[in-house]
Every structure is written in structure tokens, then in C-alpha cells.
Amino acid sequence: MKNTNQPIFIIIATLLFSLLYGCKVEDVKPFAATETYPEDRVLKSIVNKKAMIVIAHDDDMCAMTGTISALNKDGWEIRVLSLPKGKSRNEAHKRACKNLLDTVMFFDFEEQNFRLDSTGINYTAVPKEKFKVLFNRSLVKEKLREQVNDFNPSVIFTLDNEIGGYGHPEHVFISQLVLDLAKTDSLNTSYIYQSVYTNHMESSIMERHSIRMKSWGFPGDGWDKAKEAYKVDGMPEPTVQINISKEAQSKMDYLKSYNKRERKTMGFFVPAFEDYSAKDYFKIFDREFYRIIKMDE
């Protein structure tokens, strides 16, 4: 995504005021999208109402759950597939998804079989050319093809394959693998919907995250290093937007049903959601954004 001029001074002032004066409820309006994209019309036109969410981690679907909730109410059959993260976290994921979709699935292999090199920090961005020594591509490819083609979804939802939201290599690896297999007809699907943020959301939210990390004694340069590692300016540009106002309560219930650690992580990228009611919060963040990739083009 191209850089745009952002009111960073407003973001910094808001955060400093909160840190200095102990404000409980953060003003999140500076982090909401200022751009407008075409309304999605593809999903309404699909006859085979099957969607599959393929993500690395359970909480990676936090920016698409309004859309998933709407599809669920419209009669879609929906499955989610992610890496297993331990009994407690897996159960939290099932609990969070119970009112949003039909089936929660996990890849049936342990993390040590997925990640060939675990000597580094799991979430630190690494160039894509290093994925071949970092991840067991053949294992994941086999399991992914098996699960997706058994279900035969019209649409697969993922994160973006360029920077994976904020740079986590497992995000990028899974999303890139889905795209690669779909392009070679190894996966049966017609569309990939990559969940992304707008330019303004991305730059302002990541600036907020950097300021917070620095205030806690960390370098706060993870976003810049991720863009450097993947040789991009950020997430790809959205193709469409979907209004999720009617799914406000469903999305908030999903976000708040996770364990404390996962809620904190999601709170980095869904700013201060726990300080608001569903109605008030999703009056501000009333849209979700996607890059659509059509397989026959």
C-alpha cells in the first residue's frame, strides 16, 4: 500500500493523553477507515454457499468475523481451519466460533512438525525465500488440499499473502500457500477473499502499536522491519468493503469470548474494543475490507 499523509500528531496526542491521565476509554476514531471502496456484490451472487477460512492462528480471523456472521445468517456453510495452539486456546477458539460458523478444524500435526526451524522468535518477519527452511511446506500442502477439496468451498478467506496483516511469517506462509495452490488448480475454489486494512487504518493502527511497544521498553520497529523483509509498503489495497453494522453484537461477542492473552493480542490491531459496547464500537468500525482474487482470471 502506498503511504498517505496521516494525522500522526493526533494519534500520538491521543495515546500520550491516555498514558498520562489514565483515560479508560480510548478515542478510536482516528484509527477508523477514511477511504471508501466499492460494496461487495460477489458473495450475494454465489449459488454454492460454502466458505472456508484458512488461517495460521485462531485469532487471525478477527478482522473478518462481521462478514462471516452475515454469511452464516444468509445460510452459508462455513468452516475454519487453523494450526492447533493447545487445549485451552483451541477450546476458546471453538467457543468464539460457535455462533459464527459450522465447523472448527485444526491441522492434525504438531507445531514441531510444521515449523522446521524454531530457533528464532515465531512472530519475527523473515524473507519469503527462507520459508523453505522454516516451514514444512509439503506436509501443510497435503493437509490443506485434503481439507479444502473435501469441502469444495466457493470462497476461501485468508489474510493477505504479502505481509500477512502485520508481518508474522506464519500468516504470510499460509496465505501464500493457499494462493499458490488455488492458482494451479490444486484447490477447488472460485474466489479468495484476503482480509486487509485500508491505508489509513494500517498506518494509524501500526503507529499506535509502535508507540505502545516503545512505552513498554521494546524497540517498536517490528512493522518497519516486516515491510523491509517482504519488500512491500504494507498490505495490498482493498478491492471491496462490506458493511457489518448489523453484525456488531456477533462480532463483539466473538472478540470478547477469547482468553485474556488472545484478547490482548487482538486489541493491538482492533484498538480498545473491550472499552466499548458493540453498538458504539462498530458504529465507528462499520466496514470490513478485502482484496478479492478470482481464480479464473
Image (spheres, rainbow, N blue to C red):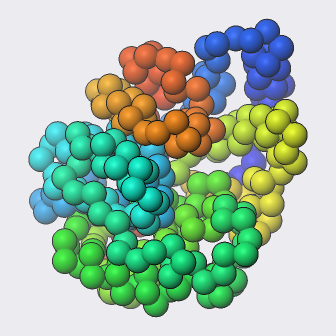
Work out whether 108 lies above or below 162.
Answer: below
Between residues 243 and 260, which one lies in front from this camera angle? 260
Image x and y of residue 32, in percent: 58, 30
Observer able to see residue 37:
no
Observer able to see residue 197:
yes
Using the rendered view, name the quadrant where residue 232 is placed.
bottom right
Which residue is found at the position 32% from the left and 86% from the top? 185
Work out whether 141 lies above or below 3.
Answer: below
Which residue is found at the position 23% from the left and 39% from the top? 99
Q: Tally the marks.
A: 0
Which residue is found at the position 78% from the left and 54% from the top? 222
Work out whether 171 lies above or below 269.
Answer: below
Image x and y of residue 240, in percent: 43, 48
Which residue sits furthest front? 87
Which residue is found at the position 52% from the left and 26% from the top? 273
Work out whether 195 lies above or below 200.
Answer: below
Taking the image as shown, residue 258 lies to the left or right of residue 34, namely left
Image x and y of residue 45, in percent: 19, 54
Between residues 65 and 91, which one lies in front from this camera angle? 91
Image x and y of residue 267, in percent: 58, 35
Q: Quadrant of the C terminus?
A: bottom left
Q: Quadrant of the N terminus?
A: bottom right
Between residues 133 and 280, which one lies in front from this camera angle? 133
